[in-house]
Image: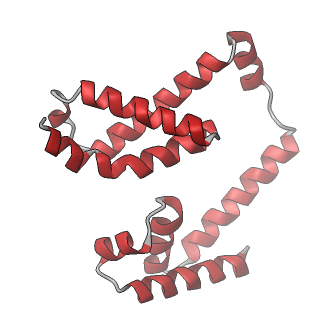
Amino acid sequence: MTRQAFQDIWIPLQGRFYRIAFYILENEADARDAVQDLYLKLWNLRDHLELIRNPQSFGSLMMRNLCIDRIRKRLPSDTLKEEMAVKGPPDEDLALREQLEGVRKAMDSLPESQRKLLSMRVIEGLDYTEIEKRTGLSGLNIRVQVSLARKRLKQLL
């Protein structure tokens, strides 16, 4: 893979990889370091990257695994086992599951277009211009639809 092809395919995914790392590591500096490590690994694999059909999925999986490795290195193995074994009280777990189920049902009740736009904005973390490029809708229309979807979710929840 050439340097230009690497830049065209992999560099635009940097924001997504950072969000994954930040979500897992919960630290801005560690997340930036993890993304940098990911790009070093990808660059070292550049001769084989042309075989990858879905760079976003492949990179996301690599990012997740790198973050897990970083967490394992930070914690002694006994501490990791203890932390994995410690769970919240069952009633908190149940409440969280019920809350998530309520959000899922509320999302399912939204019109398809609003659900799609809200998912792109909130879950995928896309900005309005990127959503505009992907959907072909005007920026104003996207903002209105996302706003309506959020208001509807607030009413339902």
Q: Is residue 147 left or right of residue 41?
A: right
Identify which residue is drawn at 63% across, 40% down: 27
Query: Looking at the image, how many numbered discs can be counted on the residues?
Result: 0
Frontmost residue, 96 versus 15:
15
Identify which residue is drawn at 55% across, 27% down: 68
Q: Position of residue 127 (x, y in %)?
A: 44, 69
Identify which residue is drawn at 64% across, 41% down: 26
Above or below residue 7? Residue 98 is below
Q: Position of residue 130 (x, y in %)?
A: 36, 69
Q: Position of residue 76 (x, y in %)?
A: 69, 12
In which quadrant of the rendered view does residue 28 lie? Answer: top right
Above or below residue 46? Residue 152 is below
Q: Is residue 126 left or right of residue 10?
A: right
Above or below residue 108? Residue 52 is above
Q: The C terminus is located in which quarter?
A: bottom right
Frontmost residue, 99 versus 118:
118
In which quadrant of the rendered view does residue 51 lie? Answer: top left
Identify which residue is drawn at 68% across, 11% down: 77
Q: The N terminus is located in which quarter?
A: top left
